Amino acid sequence: MPPELPPLPASTRAEAESTGRCPEVVDLLGRVNPALGGDTYRGLRAARALVGTAVALRDALTLMHRRGESELHAATLARALRVLDGERRAARVTLPPDPGS
């Protein structure tokens, strides 16, 4: 069995939804990243999925805004993103190191 992840910090349901959607968006952007290679169909499928995931993220943030949740608690949400392996996932969105340097 995989190791148990540490618990996520306490959050509202909308915060949890938005925090959970962010890594999904990053994963999809990583699949679209042309610098990582792959085929166009894989990128197309990821781009199509990105639309729905972005809508879900927008909806969660809209709900937070309507409820008066005007601040994102960066430290808490960053901790949650680290639990969700956000650093590794985000690395797939950037350019790989230049092999000539």
Image (cartoon, rainbow, N blue to C red):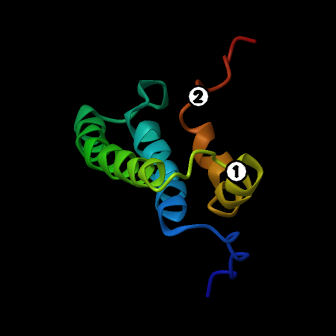
Residue tagged by mark 2? 94
Q: Residue 101: x, y in percent?
A: 75, 12
Residue most extreme to the bottom: 1
Q: How far apart are marks 1 and 2 (CA)?
A: 25 Å
Residue type at the position of mark 1: His
- Look at the image and tell me in which quarter the N terminus lies: bottom right
Q: Residue at x 45, y 52 (%)?
A: 24
Nearer to us in this view, 56 or 14? 14
Give the class, few, some or many, for how many residues have Cα within 10 Å of label 2's Cα (few <14, many ≥20): few
Q: Residue 13: x, y in percent?
A: 49, 69
- Indicate the secondary structure of the residue bearing disc 2: loop
**Residue 92, picture quadrant:** top right
Nearer to us in this view, 56 or 81? 56
Q: Would you say 47 lies left or right of 81 here?
A: left
- Indicate the secondary structure of the residue bearing disc 1: loop
Q: Residue 47: x, y in percent?
A: 28, 37
Which of discs 1 and 2 lies nearer the camera? The answer is 1
Residue most extreme to the front: 68
From this view, report whether residue 1 is shown above or below residue 44. Answer: below
Residue type at the position of mark 2: Thr
Nearer to us in this view, 34 or 58? 58
Q: Residue 54: x, y in percent?
A: 35, 44
Residue tagged by mark 1? 73
Q: Residue at x 34, y 51 (%)?
A: 59
Q: Would you say 29 lies left or right of 16 here?
A: left
